[in-house]
Each structure stands twice: as C-alpha cells, then as structure tokens.
Image: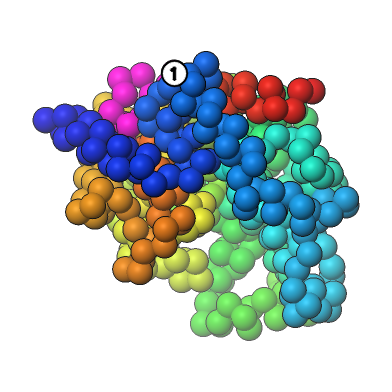
Amino acid sequence: MFKREIDQVVEQSTQRLLKVAVPPVKFWTLVYVMRKGAEDRDVQKAFEETKSYGPKLKLLASLREDGTWPISRQKKAQEDAGPGPPYGWTHITMLRNLYTLSEYCAGLDEGHIRASFEKMLSWQDEEGFITGPIEDMIPRPYYSGLTLSIMRGFGMKANEPIIRRLADWLYKIQRSDGGWNIPYIQDMKYRPLYRSMRLGEFKELIREGKTIDYNPEDYRDIPSCYWTTVGALRGLSWLPDHERYNDARRGGGYILDGFFKKNYHPGFYKSEKNWKTLKFPTFYGSGLTALDVLIGLGFGRDEPKMEAPIRWLLDARAKDGFWYHTERPHALNDQWLTMVALSLLALYSESSMMAAMMEMEDIGNELRSRQCPR
C-alpha cells in the first residue's frame, strides 16, 4: 500500500512539474524520476535546451580564467583582511557555483571549469582535506563532502588520487558512533575550561593560540554531529568500491537513528526543526539532504526505519503536488526541491535502487561527454 501511494504521488507530481520545468529540471526529472535513457528524444531535447540555458551561460561567462568568480567588495575586503584564499567567499562561491553548474549539466571542459577545480584542489593538504574556507582554517568535513559530490557531478572518476585522498581523510576522522564532528571546534567545547564559552569567544582563543593541545584520539567517543555527518556522507555515498564503504553505511545508520532528533552540538543546526525544513540550495542540512544521503547509501524499503522519514517527505508535499521552500513560492527553487523529492521517492520505490542510481549517473555522464569530448 505504501509503495502504491508513493508511485501515485510520483506520477501525479511529475506530470505537473514537467509542464512548468526549466530545461535542467526537466532533464533530471526525465532521467532521475521517469528513468528515460540517453537515446530518448525528450531527454536529448531537454539536454540541448540546457546547453543554452540563460543562468548557465551567465555563470560560465562570469567565471574568470583563474577559475574564480568575482565577489562583492565587502566580502573581498573581509577576505583580504584574513589569511586570504582558500579562506573566504572566493572559495565558498566556487563551491556553490560549481555545484550549480553541475546541476545545469555543464561539462568539465566548458569555460574555465577545469581551472576552477585545479585551483581548489591546489589547496588540498597532504592529509587529504581541502583547507578553508572558514577563517580558523580548521577543515570542515561537510565542505569536503560537498567537494566530493561536485566532483561526482562533473563525472570525475572515483579512483583519481585527489578523490581517494579526500575520502581517506574523511574516513580517518570518523567517530566511534559512525558519525563525524568538526575537528577541534565541536570537540574542545567538551572541556570544562571552554564549556561555558560562546563559539565566537572560543574561536578568538584559537586565533590567539591560547587553547590547549588537541589530540583527536582523545575525543573519538564524543557524540557526533548529525549535520556534519550528513555533509561528509554526501561525498562518500558515491564511492561504493572504497575499502571502508561499510563505515559509510554505518554513518548512514547513525543518521537514520537520529532522524527528527535535536543535534548534540549547539553551534550547528541544533533544533530538531531542521529535519522538517526544506532548504535551498538542496545541499544545506535538512531531512531532504539526509534522505538523499541515505538512499544513496542503499537504505530502501527493506529498512523499516526509513518509513517515517519517507512518510514525512510525502506529507510535506503541497496540495498542488509541489514541495515548497517557504510559504512564499519561488518559481525556480521550488522546481528543484520538487525534482529532488520526486527522485528520492522514485528511487525508494525501486526494488534495486543501487542499480537504478548507477544507470542514471551513466546517462548524465554519457551526454556530458558528447557535449565536451575529452
């Protein structure tokens, strides 16, 4: 009965979405939701329309030869006053825009996209993480996870050394409970000396070098952060051939056990309301992003604990068949939210989710390769 309800919702909302969808949303709806292949005429037409999609061309036109995008004077002054890139908005803007371009079906060799990746990966530390973009320069697992997921979006291969080093670093800092924390920031607050401090005060001590030495092994049993874990797994869920992939599945179990609960760490989405808040861009921490990760890890209809999150997603659908970011509809953002929600429901309804996901990914990569032959 539950599957039948999902299938009806997917069919009804898909038809409504296709009537208004912009080209890239239409393309991914055809591929991710309706399972149409690369030779399908509707898929090819949507892909061709996406190639000349205005917002995509605008992003490519503003991408500079050095792989960066311009930022506002205020943000540039803030960045220059600090240690400079990879700290700051230059780095954050690159991540956001590359993510968007991957959603717009851009190829790695379009414009200066490859230069953007080369610059960002030049910031990779010997340990594997990419430094920044926060001023304290403490690596954030969720930014590393986002970077990995963007690489996937551009069809980069899972066995490339830069990808393996980044994945290896994420696994290296995984906690005993299966999740992840922001190193140092979310650990040291457990010390009685710093417990009562506000995060800003604590960061000031870090900048001044007045905190005690930090050994990650001393904090491995501290409860993980749900949203740091979701962010890390966003990048690891597409690497099933990694020797520690079972640990990624263990992290998925940690998220599933914590679904709808308050976060342990007050500085990062503590309220349980974040699970039921639809956010855009869709990589922000929310129940929708968590379900994206869980389904990407293969948690499906054979896992009883998935029923409650899936039921929430179904109930979050408006009467007109769409999912909305806020009470004030946004014509474009809500199309993307609806497409993502439908793709997750369609995958959940599949009996062989992993095979379906690999097939869809191959379709996107095949069409990209035709556009930008390597």
Kindly identify the amino acid type of the residue bearing the numbered disc 1: Ala
Q: Taken as a whole, is the magenta stretch helix, strand or loop?
A: helix
- Residue 211, quarter of picture: bottom right
Task: Name the residue located 40 percent from the left edge and 43 percent from the top edge.
Answer: 339
Element type where label 1 sits in the image: helix
Would residue 150 be seen by someone viewing this image from the given angle? Answer: no
- The N terminus sits in image quarter: top left
Question: Does the magenta portion include 311?
Answer: no
Q: Is residue 254 left or right of residue 134?
A: left
Residue 279 vertical placement versus 346 (above, below) = below
Where does the image place residue 276, in percent across and percent down from the top left?
Answer: 32, 58
Mark 1 sits on what residue? Answer: 355
Count the numbered circles shown.
1
Task: Name the residue located 57 percent from the left edge and 63 percent from the top edge.
Answer: 187
Residue 81 vertical placement versus 252 (above, below) = below
- The C terminus sits in image quarter: top right
> Is disc 1 surrounded by few (<14), some (14 to 19) or many (20+) residues within 10 Å?
few
Q: Nearer the viewer, residue 91 or 66?
A: 66
Q: Which residues are magenta?
A: 345-357
Q: How is the image coloured?
A: rainbow
Q: Nearer the viewer, residue 246 or 104?
A: 104
Would residue 110 be seen by someone viewing this image from the given angle? Answer: yes
Where does the image place residue 90, in percent across and percent down from the top left?
Answer: 76, 62
Question: Outermost residue, left direction?
Answer: 1
Task: Name the residue located 16 percent from the left edge and 35 percent from the top edge.
Answer: 5
